[in-house]
Structure formats: structure tokens, C-alpha cells
């Protein structure tokens, strides 16, 4: 179960028990912090909580703010400045990161546009862009500025339609433009809108459905992969090309088990552009047929177990048969699959594979962090936007630009 699913389930359970709740969201980070903008935590009036916004150093204090927000029915922006050692001691929070974290704490109700957006993402398996105002200051008081309240939102669904709009005023068009750009690029970040002495800060986040992983192959080494993926909240499916009924019981932890011979795969397995796939049947003929199927599909990632030469041979033979995948299709292939961590056992190999997939999702190369130059995270600084212009996303696009593997078809 991923964080979004856990938050919604906890919220529904609290509602059934009559326990009021509040949501704490990291909306801005300056410097270092354990969690990045978008980290969420649901807190109930009873003190129960779901999710985390730090490594454990902020949670107790945030719970107090959340309970106060529930009692007063007011939204509040809380700042934690971890750059000062003296303040760290005074607060008694034991903060270890050297940064400033802004957390928006707000009462949560079933009518909240935020709750509706999360539900829609899960139910429709589609992405949503949510723009939330977390700061507004003005040198003057006008009817326009009075309409901007902390916690007000604008939500866009995957089709670009505005839903759950609680924002109004002249800034809406600019915020909506940035939200559309973030939705298209699947990015998140802070926007600062400045005009005539007014400053409005908005956190724009793109919420995507849980990662969907389909493993083609039902050998004993596929189970650790499913277990690790499930632990990360990914949705998993196992496809057994030998169509053995026993695979259903063996892979009970998976969300779905499909028994399908290679010749019937296209009829029984639907591959979407958001889907990650892993080919590990350990049967050359099956792997080759399934590789052809996956290359012709819109799968965003195709991992192939086995030596590089084995994959090159399959591709060469497919080419000789008249199947010529494009360079774009070949760029989705990762073979041999996994990061080079010296993996040997099935569990270690599973860790290597899942780690590579996570790196690809984040657009990272999967190297040692100590060798990384600059910040460990993508740039998340605030970007000022003038009244006459609008810009795109701040964060690194979660794309697939690291083309690690190349295959020459002779």
C-alpha cells in the first residue's frame, strides 16, 4: 500500500469511528530535509496518525498543531527551521537536517477537494495536479486579495479539466497554467506569484497512481521481486506463460496472477503506457515471444533477465524475421536488468532490480550517493512568477532519459 492509499484508508476509518482528522503536508523545503514537498501525514483528534513528514523528529509537534487545527477548524502554516543549533535545543525536537521545512496543517473533511483528488487518482488510475496556496501577503487590502486564503486549492484531472476549484481571482489563470505544465511533466514544485506588492506562494504537486509492475515469469526468483514491490506500495501482476494453476497460490501476495501462454498474451494481458514490465521466464522461446510483444506495446520500462548477449541474440533473430523495433522502443529495454550491487541470491537480485526501476522512475543513474555532486534531491527552490508570465515545473521530470542500454541489430 502506498502513501496515498494509506492516507485515504485511514481517513475513511476515522470518519466511520467519528474521529475528526487533519492533514499535514510538506509544501516547501529550503536546504536539507528527510522528506520532500508532497510528504503527507494524517492526524486524528485521538492522536492516531498515518504517514510521515520527517524521520520522526517533527511528528510529535505536528500532531499538536493538527489537533489544534481540528479544534479551531483553521488552517495554519508551520515553519521548522533546522539551521539553528540553539533553536534545535530549545525546541527539543532533535532535528538533524540542515534546512527549513514548511508544513501546511489543515482540518480534513469528506467534502475536501484534496480528498476527492486522491480518491480519483486511485479509482481512475490517473494523475492529478493540485495547486495549494500556503502563503499570501499583501501591502494593501483589496477585494482581490481578500479572496486568497491559505489552503485554497485548484485541482486538474488528467484530461486537464478543473475540478474542486476553491480558488478565485486574477491569479487563477496563471496558477492553472503552471498546474497544467506540472501535470504534463509529472513534476511538483513551489510557485511564487508577485504583483503590485502582493506575494502568493503556491505548492503545485502532481499525484500519480501507484506504480504498476507486471512480471512475466513465475519462477521461484520472481517471488522476492513481488514481495519487495508490494512493500513499496506498487501494484503487481504475475504472468505465468506456462499457465500452471499452482502459480496462483505461490504468488498470493501479488495483486493479480494471470495464466497465459505466449500466444494468448495479447488477449489476456493489457499493457498501458504507465506500466513497468519485467521479463524473466528463463525460457528462451517464451522470452523472445514476450519481448516482441512488449516492444510493440506502450510499456514504459522493459527489464530483461539474463546476459546482455542473450537479449542481443533475441533482438537479432526478431530483426531477421522482419520485426524491427524503433530506437525509441529499444531505449525502453534494460538488459541485463538491475543495478550492479554484486547481487547473488534471489533476494539480492530482486533488490537490484527494484532499485534500478526506482532509479529509472526518478530519472537517476543509480550511482553511489557519496559520488553525487550537489543536492541529493532535485532542485525544489521557489520560483517567482510575474503577473505577465507563467513557467513550467521546478522539479526534475520523472522521465526515462537515461538510456543505459543500446542494442545493435546486425
Image: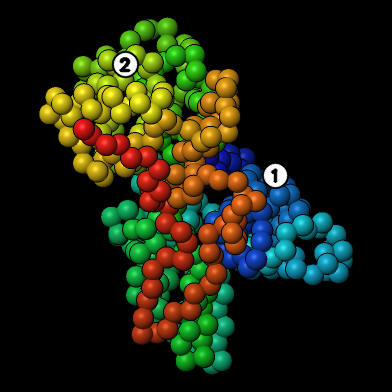
Q: Is residue 10 above or below residue 96?
A: above
**Viewer can see residue 149:** no
Secondary structure beneath dot 2 equals helix
Outermost residue on the left side: it is 322
Q: Going 46% across and 23% down the picture, which residue do you hit?
A: 254
Q: Position of residue 384 (x, y in %)?
A: 48, 79
Question: Residue 353 has which mark?
Answer: none
**Viewer can see residue 263:** yes
Outermost residue on the front side: it is 410
Question: Residue 48 has which mark?
Answer: 1
Q: Is residue 260 above or below residue 402?
A: above
Q: Going 52% across and 82% down the picture, which residue do you hit?
A: 199
Quarter of the rendering occupied by the C terminus: top left
Q: Going 41% across and 25% down the picture, which residue do you hit?
A: 307
Secondary structure beneath dot 1 equals loop
In this rendering, position of residue 267 left or right of residue 212:
left
In this rendering, position of residue 88 left or right of residue 51:
right
Sequence-first tag of 1 and 2: 1
Residue nearer the viewer, 384 or 128: 384
Q: Quadrant of residue 302?
A: top left
Q: Position of residue 323 (x, y in %)?
A: 16, 30
Residue nearer the viewer, 52 or 186: 186
Q: Position of residue 285 (x, y in %)?
A: 27, 15
Frontmost of labels 1 and 2 is 2
In this figure, which residue is indicated by the disc labeled 2?
284
Q: CA distance from mark 1 to mark 2?
A: 52 Å
Q: Is residue 206 above or below residue 151?
A: above
Q: Going 42% across and 11% down the picture, which residue do you hit?
A: 247
Q: Position of residue 221 (x, y in %)?
A: 50, 18
Amino acid at each position: 500500500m502506498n502513501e496515498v492509499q494509506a492516507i485515504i484508508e485511514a481517513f475513511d476509518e476515522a470518519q466511520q469511528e467519528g474521529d475528526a482528522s487533519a492533514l499535514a503536508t510538506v509544501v516547501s523545503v529550503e536546504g536539507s530535509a528527510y522528506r520532500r514537498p508532497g510528504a503527507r501525514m494524517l492526524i486524528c483528534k485521538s492522536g492516531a496518525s498515518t504517514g510521515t513528514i520527517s524521520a520522526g523528529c517533527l511528528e510529535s509537534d505536528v500532531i499538536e498543531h493538527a489537533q489544534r487545527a481540528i479544534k479551531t477548524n483553521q488552517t495554519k502554516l508551520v515553519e521548522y527551521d533546522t539551521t539553528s543549533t540553539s533553536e534545535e535545543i530549545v525546541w527539543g525536537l532533535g532535528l538533524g537536517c540542515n534546512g527549513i521545512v514548511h508544513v501546511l496543517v489543515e482540518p480534513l473533511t469528506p467534502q475536501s477537494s484534496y480528498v476527492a483528488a486522491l480518491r480519483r487518482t486511485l479509482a481512475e488510475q490517473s494523475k492529478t495536479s493540485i495547486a495549494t496556496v500556503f502563503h499570501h501577503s499583501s501591502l494593501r487590502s483589496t477585494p482581490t486579495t481578500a479572496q486568497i486564503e491559505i489552503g485554497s486549492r485548484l485541482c486538474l484531472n488528467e484530461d486537464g479539466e478543473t475540478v474542486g476549484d476553491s480558488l478565485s481571482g486574477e491569479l487563477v489563470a496563471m496558477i492553472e497554467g503552471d498546474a497544467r505544465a506540472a501535470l504534463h511533466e509529472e513534476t511538483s514544485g513551489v510557485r511564487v506569484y508577485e504583483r503590485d506588492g502582493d506575494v502568493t506562494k503556491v505548492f503545485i504537486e502532481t499525484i500519480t497512481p501507484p506504480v504498476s509492475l507486471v512480471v512475466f515469469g513465475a519462477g521461484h526468483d520472481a517471488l522476492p521481486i513481488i514481495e519487495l514491490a508490494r512493500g513499496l506500495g506498487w501494484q503487481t501482476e504475475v504472468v505465468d506463460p506456462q499457465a500452471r494453476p499452482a502459480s496462483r497460490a505461490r504468488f498470493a501476495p501479488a495483486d493479480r496472477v494471470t495464466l497465459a501462454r505466449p500466444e494468448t498474451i495479447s488477449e489476456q494481458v493489457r499493457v498501458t503506457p504507465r506500466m513497468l514490465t519485467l521479463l524473466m521466464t528463463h525460457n528462451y522461446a517464451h522470452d523472445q515471444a514476450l519481448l516482441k510483444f512488449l516492444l510493440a506495446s506502450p510499456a514504459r520500462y522493459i527489464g530483461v533477465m539474463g546476459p546482455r548477449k542473450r537479449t542481443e541474440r533475441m533482438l537479432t533473430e526478431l530483426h531477421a524475421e522482419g520485426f524491427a523495433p524503433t530506437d525509441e522502443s529499444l531505449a525502453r529495454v534494460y538488459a541485463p536488468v538491475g543495478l550492479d550491487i554484486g547481487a547473488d541470491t534471489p533476494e539480492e537480485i530482486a533488490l537490484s532490480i527494484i532499485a534500478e526501476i526506482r532509479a529509472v522512475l526518478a530519472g537517476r543513474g543509480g550511482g553511489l550517493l557519496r559520488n553525487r555532486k550537489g543536492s541529493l534531491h532535485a532542485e525544489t527552490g521557489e520560483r517567482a512568477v510575474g503577473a505577465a508570465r507563467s513557467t513550467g515545473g521546478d522539479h526534475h521530470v520523472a522521465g526515462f532519459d537515461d538510456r543505459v542500454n543500446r542494442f545493435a541489430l546486425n
